[in-house]
Amino acid sequence: MSQVIETIDVDVPITEAYNQWTQFESFPHFLSFVESITQQDDTHSHWKVKIGGVEREFDTLITEQHPDERVAWKSIDGTTHAGVVTFHKLAETTSRVTVQIDWAPEGLVEKAGDLLNFDERAIKSDLKHFKEFIESRPAETGAWRGDVPRD
């Protein structure tokens, strides 16, 4: 199992950063590997991704979600992975977003990419894109403020 942990500070209030992160269908705007996400209900979504030229589709389940604190998920089919995004208030208008993803690289391309730390660089770059996306807008594109207790 491989793991990536990356953090970025964004110049928006914690609620705005969290609210944007709950808008999964907006992820293709700032996550380079995401082709599309279809929200099926409050806790299930279908992902289409392209990593290193390899296309994959899988479904995820939100396993825990608390407004302005965290969103945790795991795959329920396809590529084996899980992750959590946590939100930390640094000041009234500044927040820290930390992403942790645990995944099992499949095939030669993904295993080579893991050894060369391409996944870490990609997540770091995509967090910079998230920062640019959220800071360039007058407000988040939407919000889901529901609570999902831990499994």
Image (cartoon, rainbow, N blue to C red):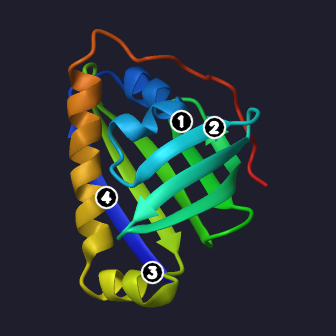
Above/below status of 51 relative to 105: above
Above/below status of 92 relative to 32: above
Residue behind mark 3 = 2
Label 3 sits on what residue type?
Ser
Q: CA distance from mark 4 to mark 2?
A: 21 Å
Residue 46: x and y in percent read: 66, 47
Residue behind mark 1 = 24
Q: CA distance from mark 2 to mark 1?
A: 8 Å
Residue behind mark 4 = 123
User: Residue placed at 28% from the left, 19% from the top?
Assistant: 92
**Among the two numbered marks 1 and 3 on one chain, the one whose residue lies closer to the N terminus:** 3
Residue 52: x and y in percent read: 35, 70
- Secondary structure beneath label 1: helix
Depth order, front residue of 84/29: 29
**Residue 94 visible in the picture:** no
- Secondary structure beneath label 3: strand
Q: CA distance from mark 4 to mark 3?
A: 13 Å
Q: Indicate the quadrant containing the C terminus: top left, top right, bottom left or bottom right.
A: bottom right
**Residue 110 visible in the picture:** yes
Q: CA distance from mark 1 to mark 3?
A: 23 Å
Q: CA distance from mark 2 to mark 3?
A: 26 Å
- Secondary structure beneath label 2: strand
- Secondary structure beneath label 4: helix
Residue behind mark 2 = 38
Label 4 sits on what residue type?
Ile
User: Residue placed at 47% from the left, 64% from the top?
Assistant: 101
Label 2 packing within 10 angstroms: few (<14), some (14-19), many (20+): some
Is residue 31 rendered to the left or right of residue 9? right
Label 1 sits on what residue type?
Phe
**Among the two numbered marks 4 and 1 on one chain, the one whose residue lies closer to the N terminus:** 1
Label 2 sits on what residue type?
Thr
Label 1 packing within 10 angstroms: few (<14), some (14-19), many (20+): some
